[in-house]
Image: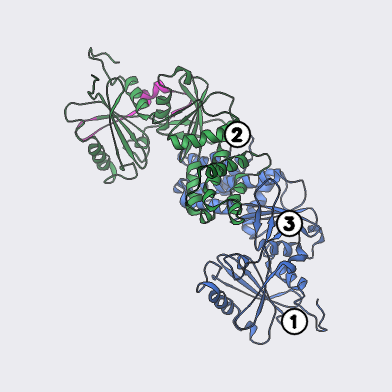
Chain colours: A green, B blue
Amino acid sequence: MTDDTPALIALDWGTSSLRAFAMTAQGRVIDTRASGHGVQHLPEPGLPGFEAAFAAICGTWLDRAPLPVVASGMVGSAQGWREVPYLPCPADLGALPHAAGRVTTAGGQDILIAPGLIHDPAGAPPDVMRGEEIQIAGAIAGHPDRQAGTTLILPGTHSKWARVEGGTVTGFETHMTGELFALLRTRSILGRLMSDAPLADTVRHAAFLDGVAEAARDGAGGLTHLLFGTRTLGLTGRLPAAALAEYCSGLLIGHEIVSALATRADGPLLLVGSPALCARYDRALTAIAGRGAEAIVENPAPAGLFRLACDAGLLTSESGDPI
Amino acid sequence: MTDDTPALIALDWGTSSLRAFAMTAQGRVIDTRASGHGVQHLPEPGLPGFEAAFAAICGTWLDRAPLPVVASGMVGSAQGWREVPYLPCPADLGALPHAAGRVTTAGGQDILIAPGLIHDPAGAPPDVMRGEEIQIAGAIAGHPDRQAGTTLILPGTHSKWARVEGGTVTGFETHMTGELFALLRTRSILGRLMSDAPLADTVRHAAFLDGVAEAARDGAGGLTHLLFGTRTLGLTGRLPAAALAEYCSGLLIGHEIVSALATRADGPLLLVGSPALCARYDRALTAIAGRGAEAIVENPAPAGLFRLACDAGLLTSESGDPI
């Protein structure tokens, strides 16, 4: 019989959504809840909104006994419950608790909030992440092979490419790929020709890889130019309207991968995120570099938050010692 | 005393606006009118909308005597008054009349509509322009030095880089720079930190050139990454909020120029368009390539339309011979 006693509440609290996990003292997720109460969508403004969103998602979880609570994501931003300063790279992921912030609810519940990371290379603009550091910690937890010389790719609205050495994040870059794609699809002249009509997977995949190949072609020109090809291929009927979004996605993801790979040495690549989006990146990586990711890691936030709680000494064994 | 007798009506008819010029038989503009009746903003849908917009802007111009009328721009597109197929590159600008289309209004007025151009290189998506071919014809008319080995840059929503050899457009590329900038400023996370507060010109120019330099720096990474620097420079207070739009503009224009220059041989550069936008490109060109444009040409559409009318034999001298 497994032990289903909750020992930790872990919150993945982003801009537009809030996910909560009840976990055992061994780090197993026994219950998952989600709400739309992201930092920008609270039930009421300001601190009462955070209190209300927290109470609503926890429900009865905290009724029986007090439990430690940890959180990550935009809840620690300037627009969050409490701003927690960024920890600078190189950042030892085991040191996240020392840089974490704390809030106490009106009911007396302490919540530990993870810091984000800042990468501030000489001669270039800085880069920031908030929430992804916990996903990275979760993705490499228990995998010594992932802790040295690996690049973790977290595709999304703002994709992150992070280098890990010995359990330390040495640096990272953000690509606005997902946000650009959404803008181009919904708000630009390119979107006007696009159709959502059904299309065979083979045709969709081929159009995506056409875009990837064009982004990777020597002499093809810059991204501002390449994107317009989405329009002309539609205007001239060389791609069906239902394949244009795939081509545009291939251009953007291809551009991201080509430029990101150009700035780093060889080494294992790990994809972290939703299986569908990671599979898309994996196909593009294979087309560009001849090799895909070593692995695709789905939903590592609970494992990362569990590690944060352990490193912070919030989980104790029956003897009272930190686990 | 100058001859102010109108001999030609020339229409620059785009997506969002319509400009009309009354010109003499010598190509001098004697009257200019503008309306918001672009192809996508007609007073009523379909053909009656074109008729009404045309009658409204011409007013009394055509009352005294019939005059030839020429037009260019999106009026010749699939959403225009009549679709005029693209002329393929290499395209002799003197041959535009042979590829032009004609409509006749309900009142019996003939209108000659210029074709657009299509550049269809092997192994790359095609590229198209509609209206810029007339601006190019106008910019090089009467300037033999501009007719060979020159690159004309027409900055805008969809910037064009066109190569001209012996009065022939040999090829061109479109960059979606202006549209991307507008989307990022008004619809993206980058725009949230931007402010329109007044700022000293020196600070604005420096922020613009910072963006240009970052786009041109070896190893800086791809555009999807560079754009995010607009956010982090704002978040960390390294650029004032009122300078962030300038930095973003510098990134985009710098990316366009670096990638466009990489695909062409040395040769004179000519900037064509609004003086403010051309001056911006000129500063970026000087920063990247160490030389600006040979000249900045403002509003060449009337001269290009006049040349179209002459080449089409629409303007006759008093003897009845074509000019």
- Report if residue A96 lies within the magenta region: yes
Q: Which residues are magenta?
A: A87-109
Pointer 3 indicates a residue of which chain?
A: B
Q: Is residue B53 left or right of residue B8?
A: left
Q: Is residue B242 above or below residue B323?
A: above
Label 3 near label 1: C-beta < 8 Å?
A: no
Viewport quadrant of the N terminus of chain B: bottom right
B302 and A215: which is toward the camera: A215
Q: Position of residue A79 (x, y in %)?
A: 36, 41
Q: Chain of mark 2?
A: A
Element under label 2? helix
- Mark drawn on residue B89: 3
Check if residue A228 falls in the magenta segment. no
Tell me if label 3 and label 2 are in contact, CB under 8 Å.
no
What amino acid type should be assigned to the residue bearing mark 3?
Cys
Q: Amino acid at mark 2?
A: Ile
Q: CA distance from mark 1 to mark 2?
A: 65 Å
Question: Which residue appears farthest toward the top when viewing the image?
Answer: A319
What's the distance in space between the residues labelled 1 and 3, CA to CA? 38 Å
Q: Quadrant of the C terminus of chain B?
A: bottom right
Question: Which residue corresponds to mark 2?
Answer: A288
Q: Is residue B188 left or right of residue B298?
A: left
Query: Residue at the location (61% across, 47% down)?
Result: A226
Element under label 1? loop
Q: Which residue, given by chain and number where applicable, does mark 1 sit on?
A: B3
